Amino acid sequence: MQRAHITASGWRLIGVESLQWCANNAVYFLGLIGIATYDLEGGALLVAGITLVRNLATSLGNMGAGVAIDRWGPRFITLLTLAFTVIASLIVGLVPTTTGVLFAAAVFLGISGGCINTCTHAFPGYLEPDSKSRQQLNGLMMFYSNIAYTLGPIVGGALVAVFPTRSVYLFMAVLMAAAFLLAWRCKEVRRPMSEAAASQSALARIGDGARLTFASVGLSVIFFSGFFGNFAFGAFDSLESLFYRDVLRVNIVWLGFLSSVVGLTSSIGSYLLTRVPVGFADIRTLLASLLLVGIGSMVYVGTDVLAIAILGQAINGLAWGFLEPLQMSLVQERAPLEHLGTVMGFVRFGLMSAGVLPVLAAPTLADAFGVQSVLFGASALIAAIALLSLIWWSRLEHK
């Protein structure tokens, strides 16, 4: 890895992203879905409801952060989000867990997660002026954060083996406090906004973000491929923990362990992006990565054999690890800096809001066809959308 190309602020941003993913992954799988499935003994309806609330809150966080970034810059919004997360996670970690508390946790995790992800996805555009430097920063940020993503559920699993499951929220509070200290010294080196953007209303800036996204063919493809791909993944949000419990027949600890497999192979995928020439880091490669996600997901849920599920998750992680920082680089490259926050927020909003309808429909479909059948169908849909998009884009390029 060519560390010389990354500034001190860039390395601090990598630290922020790594710490927040370590905390969020542990809390999502164990402190949210795990508590709903195991501690509260909930079924598909409870898991779907909690996931729906979290996804809606995340979408709001994405859009709100995007607008705020264009006005105040990513550093200030990152600090504000991290401070809020420390306080909220301390509260949830200390009070007894009930269904109401879990829904409240879903709201705060969604808002804070949507805000911090939009911030860290937009931040490289304010730190690095050229495409190659941004691509390397994005790749390394995902490389290290995916290692942290892997460690989060492992540490979280060790905590819940000894302490109440809600202890993972206290773990989150500690890590987010450390991330706050790093973000404090992470300075933007480019102007975060234009004077015209500062005079616009929030709704006007959201409208500009949507208009700029759809005015660009490249940004539109990034948005819609991500939207429809995540549309299918909405089924996983409400049914994946039931797949572990009822199909693979494993306990709550495996929620963390298989998530760690994704984190490990995602790190490899992210590192590969840092070695890809800028000319090959394009939309065709993005769509090919999404196709591999669909294939990996089909392997993951296609049987009731744990070893094959692990293999599928490994493929999934490799593809996602390459895809996400590539998507970040492509949006940063195509969006004007003064609108980067709203464009990134709008793209992230599309990714998260896509799963709302499937979250609602998945429990009913699972009752009719079974959890595994629904998840396999969703995986096949991801692969089909990616393949059709790849064919269409290839034809468009050759016109």
Image (cartoon, rainbow, N blue to C red):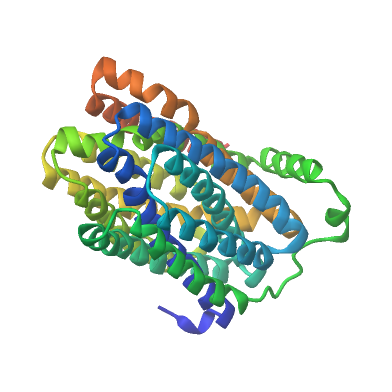
Return the residue nearer the eye: 182 or 142: 182
80 over 312 or under it: above or below: below
Return the residue nearer the eye: 233 or 64: 64
* Residue occupying the point 15% across, 38% down: 248
Image location (x, y in percent) of residue 21: 42, 60
Image location (x, y in percent) of residue 4: 50, 84
Location of the N terminus by quadrant is bottom left
264 over 103 or under it: above or below: below
Image location (x, y in percent) of residue 118: 59, 54
Image location (x, y in percent) of residue 160: 25, 57
Residue 218 in view here? no
Location of the C terminus by quadrant is top right
Residue 143 sits in quarter: bottom left
Residue 332 sits in quarter: bottom right
197 over 270 or under it: above or below: above
Residue 96 is left or right of residue 250, and the answer is right
Residue 136 is left or right of residue 210, and the answer is left
Residue 169 is left or right of residue 305, and the answer is right
Residue 173 in view here? yes
**Which residue lies most toward the top here?**
368
* Residue occupying the point 37% across, 37% down: 237
* Residue occupying the point 43% across, 25% down: 360
* Residue occupying the point 55% across, 50% down: 114
